[in-house]
Amino acid sequence: MLARRLGFLGLLAPAGLLLAALFLFPLANMAALSVRTRFPGAFTYTLEHYAKFVTEPYFLQVTQTTFTLAVVVTILTIVLGYPVAYYFVRSRSRLKHVIFLLVISPLLVSIVVRTIGWTIVLGNEGLVNNLLRALGATREPLPLMNNFWSVTVGMVHVLLPFMILSIASVLGKIDPALEESAAVLGANPAWTFWRVTLPLSVQGIAAGSILVFCLTIGAYITPWWLGRGKVLLFSTTIYDQMLAIIDWPFGSAAAMLLVAATMVVVTVYFTLLRHVGPR
Amino acid sequence: MTVDVRLAAVTKRFGAVTAVDAVSLDVPQGEVLALLGPSGCGKTTTLRIVAGFEAPDDGTVEIRGRVVNDVPTYRRNLGMVFQQYALFPHMSVFDNVAFGLRMRGVPRGDVPRLVEEAMALVRLTGLSERFPSQLSGGQQQRVALARAIVTKPAVLLLDEPLGALDKKLREQMQVEIRALQRQVGITTIFVTHDQEEALTLADRIAVMEHGRVIQVGTPTEIYERPRSRFVSDFIGVSNILEGKVVSGDAAALVIELPSGSRVSATPVAGPATGDRIEVAVRPEKIRLSDTADGSVNVLAGTLANVVYLGAVTYSYIQTADTRLVVMEQNRAPRPASAPSPIGRTVHACWDVASTLVLSSRP
Ligand SMILES: Nc1ncnc2c1ncn2[C@@H]1O[C@H](COP(=O)(O)OP(=O)(O)OP(=O)(O)O)[C@@H](O)[C@H]1O
Ligand SMILES: [Mg+2]
């Protein structure tokens, strides 16, 4: 019995060790850093960095923008991704393999190429603005870059595959006979979706949402490139504090708060979702 | 007699496969029709066309006199039980059964009573609050049935409804479904590849092969008067004899087997003297005796094998032309041990009317 338990633990050991070395240890280190008055050098323990973060309007603004962005990106990926996932799972067409490639293509392209691509599309001399001007719709270029929405577009683009694949994996396990059953019982397609398909795929939406939400909150390069200092996010702030201002204790405190806030949101979300979906 | 379901020359192709080939069927009100046939013969596809899940490439589907080719499933007023039941896993038993009522806009106040009635019909009470995963296979089957009949649909469709149950439970459910169907009188089409299930449940059986309906009739007609070798083989067991018609007059159809032995059949229109012909004899229609017993049809042979199955015994007789299988009821008490009869000469005897003409060609 005990031997078997130990055997199972053995299976977890490699991943566990890796996690401890690369994640838990640095995290603990950061936690320790965040309560030091300064680093490097002589120090005493303090909570002043945390106090500073939660009292300064600038940082509250950053927090708000970050979580708004994560929520908006998550919602958009659900709305855009769900139909694609559904098509992907139910279609008998041969076209679906092409669609699959298109779906995961953002993951195959390097982040730099992808973001520069969006610059080419959205910039002042970009595709959209040139087109609008050629059509005579605008005279001055529209400010499509360096704002909340350009960051949103970039994030949705790269995170959409995660949402689609998460939803598709759950949708694929739903027996089509359940939807047929609903139809026979008199449910039109909208009701069938609302009462059967959607509740049964909630787990996929949940998994996808967690992925997209956390990846958005942690994203750094895409917001930096498509926001250009106009969109101030948690991640870029931590980066600035650590590497530009070189205030490691304060950066660490910010990072710890980010981890805590994300965990709270994720827990609340999962608790809410536990009440829908199959038993 | 009103016809509840009518298929007229319905054809469905999947690429190169013709799954359903010009099928025409009438199902009168209150009848139970079985679609019976081997795997891949198009039974499920036919049922799915009636349900509206598949659109026929040709032909029309009528339900209660209305052509429904362009009517979506949810407006066809059907009930259906799927092979794996397809109960909604996220809803309680009550909500599963109530689903159809709610979709049809039945007043809120009536729903609990109607659900209760349907549950009583399938003899399932007190499980309303459970979820499907908390039920046994037989209970799920009953919930699926209750859900299908609670809305009093025009037609009930069943696709191998008992396929997932073990033999004992399956036989019990067959009897119950039959009783239930009689009670509510609902027109029913069900798919099965199990001949016994078809014989037990159906008023009429449509035998399918390669997408075509090759014979429709009552269980007795199908069993006693199969019109082709396929039907006679698929429903029950048959001894097939091939030979030549030597006289085809009004008195009797006499067939000569390759060995020169002759057998007689009731005359039928078609075969003429000299035609090649195929006839069948059911194993239970044959009597075994030590001497020719005076029957018109007698074939002598040696007993090659005997299989004792408790209620019945199968004997295999090697004759000059073929090996016959004979089924006898073990009516008389049998001694616990007896000398092996294998190798003995016996005579297989049967009546003229038991020779079934399957096909003939010049
Ligand atoms: N969606 C489909 N796409 C392509 N071919 C199909 C499809 N559905 C059925 N077929 C083909 O049509 C034929 C009839 O299939 P069907 O499911 O109706 O057979 P069945 O009589 O119900 O067989 P079984 O007893 O195995 O369930 C088969 O050859 C099958 O491969
Ligand atoms: Mg089938």
Image: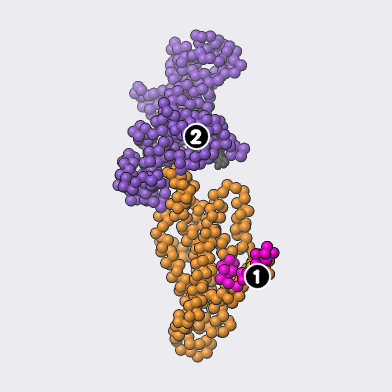
Chain colours: A orange, B purple
Q: Quadrant of residue B188?
A: top left
Quarter holding ligand 1: top right
Instruction: Let me know if residue A141 is in the magenta part.
Output: yes
Can residue B46 be seen here? The reply is yes
**Image disc number at residue A141:** 1
Span of residues in magenta: A133-154
Q: Are marks 2 and 1 in contact (CB under 8 Å)?
A: no
Spot occupied by residue A276 in the image (x, y as percentages of width and height): 41, 57
Residue at the image position 51 percent from the left and 9 percent from the top:
B250
Residue at the image position 44 percent from the left and 20 percent from the top:
B285
Q: Residues within 10 Å of mark 1 (few under 14, many from 20)?
A: some
Spot occupied by residue A199 in the image (x, y as percentages of width and height): 44, 55
Can residue A131 be seen here? The reply is no
In the image, B326 versus A241, the foreground residue is: A241
> Mark 1 falls within which chain?
A
Amino acid residing under circle 2: Val
CA gap, disc 2 to disc 1?
59 Å
Q: Quadrant of residue B209?
A: top right
Spot occupied by residue A188 in the image (x, y as percentages of width and height): 46, 47
* Label 1: which secondary element: loop
Instruction: Let me know if residue B84 is in the magenta part.
Output: no
Label 2 sits on residue: B67
Q: Quadrant of residue A124?
A: bottom right
Residue at the image position 48 percent from the left and 39 percent from the top:
B51
Mark 2 and ligand 1: say if the CB distance to the nearest ligand atom is below 8 Å. no
